[in-house]
Image (cartoon, rainbow, N blue to C red):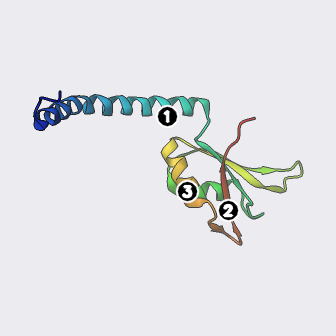
Amino acid sequence: MSGDPPDVNLRWLELFFTARVPLLRELVGRLKKLLQSLLQTQNLVDKFHPKKLDDSIDDDKLNELFSEFSTIMSCKVMRDPSGVSRGSGFVAFTTLEEASRALYEMNEKMVTSKPLYVTLTQRK
């Protein structure tokens, strides 16, 4: 190796990595799809929990607030037995990307008179 000219070593490295980059990209793509599929079937990441909702927010209004990010699988404002809002709810999107974008853009956004706080749903 010490007797080889430097350009030969560089050419070998270039060939070595160039041949593997497409394979690595394909592998990473497959792993991302597999992970997203697993997360969605387990409902681990595509759901989040909006908190500090104004009392005027109902299921329809919550759906309207988050529907700009794409298709909502479900959304619900939590209520006590008498029907009064508990000030929080749950929203589930069809993909991880949609949920991530909504989480990023809606957290601390002013809705009516209060800032909205959005967190990932914690499994018990």
N-terminal-most mark, 2 or 1: 1
Q: Quadrant of residue 25?
A: top left
Report which residue position mark 2 lands on: 116
Amino acid on which disc 2 is placed: Leu
Q: Which mark is residue 51?
A: none
Tell whether label 3 touches label 2 (CB within 8 Å): no
Mark 2 to mark 3 CA distance (whole Å) = 12 Å
Q: Dividing the image into 4 quarters, which one contains the C terminus?
A: top right
Residue at (72%, 61%) from the top-left corner? 57
| Above or below, comparing residue 29 to residue 110 in the picture | above
N-terminal-most mark, 2 or 3: 3
Report which residue position mark 3 lands on: 104
Looking at the image, which is closer to me, 36 or 81? 36
Can you name the residue that lies furthest to the bottom here?
113
Mark 2 to mark 1 CA distance (whole Å) = 27 Å
Left or right, 23 with respect to 119, comes to left
Label count reads 3
